[in-house]
Image: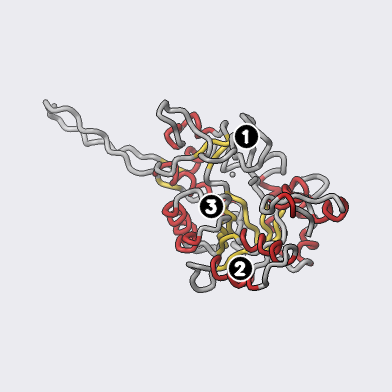
């Protein structure tokens, strides 16, 4: 299941203000030196902000798992097939995590991010990513990056540099995400204001350094809502860019944080109920009502026919066709009904 090794050094500056020296020595102890909050610097803008980003209600997303998308499994392999993606009717390309993956306790998941501000050599270089984004924009396609805010890899520099940025037990030991089997990642502590600022600065940096058009936020129901409000407000303040922001979660309150989209997990399961288990078609009406609760204006629920999680549990549509009559697997279905659509 489902991306600052050096971000604090690159993007944030801490300034210490010192008291004025006087000619008289005081008998009282020196007052503590006040420290200003971290100040994020804005990287230079690469390229020209894309003016063709669709309105949220007009977006058609195509997810790219770079490891599986081309024979080379890299940015160049995606760039070479952008015309095919556009021909499908998509106008937004969403890339799975592009960041270096941790090695400690690793299961080789791209969702165990070692450095939020770097490109994984597995996929290419920053120049290769920029080439992909430029090529997409030239075809009228927007590009979203996948962002993993809830946790990092165990060898992310934050673990040693800022252990207080992580969830720790009474003995001070950093923990994996509670109530999950995600042992390859370390849970971040969203009570840490400096961690939040560093995280948001890293998000924002990609808008400038790679000229991307927004983010899909992984496991969005886990971090607290006030963090997302802080992050979304900061990103919306980038006035040079029109950004699309997708919360991969079904918490209705996510709409109040300002996301353009939440994820229609239950709607996908509804397809199985209606088309394979003879549930009433009114199931879709009920799901539409429940999933859109809290949405205002043109905020949307993303409905999908497949994604990397579905491929992981069911197999790809091609594998399903090739494997019949052997059943595919999907975690939403009881064992007796797991089969290909």
Mark closer to the chain start, 2 or 3: 2
The residue singled out by tag 3 in the image is: 220
Mark closer to the chain start, 1 or 2: 2
Can residue 48 be spotted in the picture? Answer: no
Residue 324 position within the rendered picture, expressed as x and y whole percent measured from the top left:
87, 53
Task: Measure the alpha-carbon separation of dots 1 and 3.
Answer: 21 Å
The residue singled out by tag 2 in the image is: 51
Q: Nearer the viewer, residue 44 or 159?
A: 159
Check contact, mark 1 vs mark 3: CB within 8 A: no
Task: Measure the alpha-carbon separation of dots 1 and 2.
Answer: 35 Å
Residue 234 position within the rendered picture, expressed as x and y whole percent measured from the top left:
45, 56
The residue singled out by tag 1 in the image is: 102
- Left or right of 307, for residue 12: left
* Nearest to viewer (mark 2 / mark 3): 3
Residue at point 54% right, 67% down?
290
Q: Secondary structure at mark 2?
A: loop
Residue at point 44% right, 57% down?
229
Can residue 213 be spotted in the picture? Answer: yes
* Nearest to viewer (mark 1 / mark 3): 3
Residue 30 position within the rendered picture, expressed as x and y whole percent measured from the top left:
19, 29
- Left or right of 158, for residue 170: left
Residue at point 13% right, 28% down?
28
Vertical side of 340 occupied by 283: above or below: below
Model colouring: secondary structure
Q: Secondary structure at mark 3?
A: loop
């Amino acid at each position: 299941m489902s991306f600052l090794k050096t971000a604090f050094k690159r993007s944030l500056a801490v300034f210490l203000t010192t008291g004025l020296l006087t000619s008289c020595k005081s008998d009282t102890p020196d007052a503590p030196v006040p420290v200003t909050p971290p100040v994020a610097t804005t990287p230079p803008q690469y390229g020209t902000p894309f003016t063709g980003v669709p309105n949220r209600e007009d977006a058609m997303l195509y997810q790219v798992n770079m490891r599986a998308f081309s024979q080379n499994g890299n940015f160049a392999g995606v760039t070479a097939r952008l015309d095919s993606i556009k021909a499908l009717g998509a106008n937004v390309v969403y890339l799975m995590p592009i960041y270096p993956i941790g090695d400690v306790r690793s299961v080789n998941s791209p969702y165990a991010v070692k450095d939020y501000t770097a490109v994984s050599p597995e996929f290419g270089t920053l120049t290769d990513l920029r080439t992909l984004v430029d090529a997409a924009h030239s075809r009228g396609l927007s590009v979203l990056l996948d962002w993993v805010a809830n946790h990092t890899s165990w060898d992310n520099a934050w673990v040693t540099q800022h252990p207080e940025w992580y969830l720790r037990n009474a003995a001070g030991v950093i923990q994996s995400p509670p109530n999950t089997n995600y042992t390859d990642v370390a849970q971040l502590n969203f009570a840490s204001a400096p961690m939040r600022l560093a995280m948001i600065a890293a998000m924002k940096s990609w808008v400038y350094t790679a000229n991307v058009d927004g983010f899909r936020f992984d496991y969005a129901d886990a971090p607290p809502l006030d963090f997302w409000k802080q992050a979304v407000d900061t990103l919306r303040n980038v006035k040079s860019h029109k950004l699309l922001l997708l919360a991969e979660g079904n918490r209705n309150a996510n709409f109040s944080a300002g996301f353009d989209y939440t994820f229609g997990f239950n709607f996908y399961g509804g397809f199985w109920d209606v088309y394979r288990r003879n549930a009433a078609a009114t199931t879709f009406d009920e799901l539409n009502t429940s999933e859109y609760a809290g949405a205002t204006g043109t905020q949307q629920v993303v409905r999908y026919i497949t994604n990397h999680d579905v491929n992981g549990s069911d197999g790809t549509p091609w594998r399903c066709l090739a494997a019949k009559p052997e059943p595919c697997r999907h975690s939403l279905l009881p064992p007796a009904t797991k089969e290909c659509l």
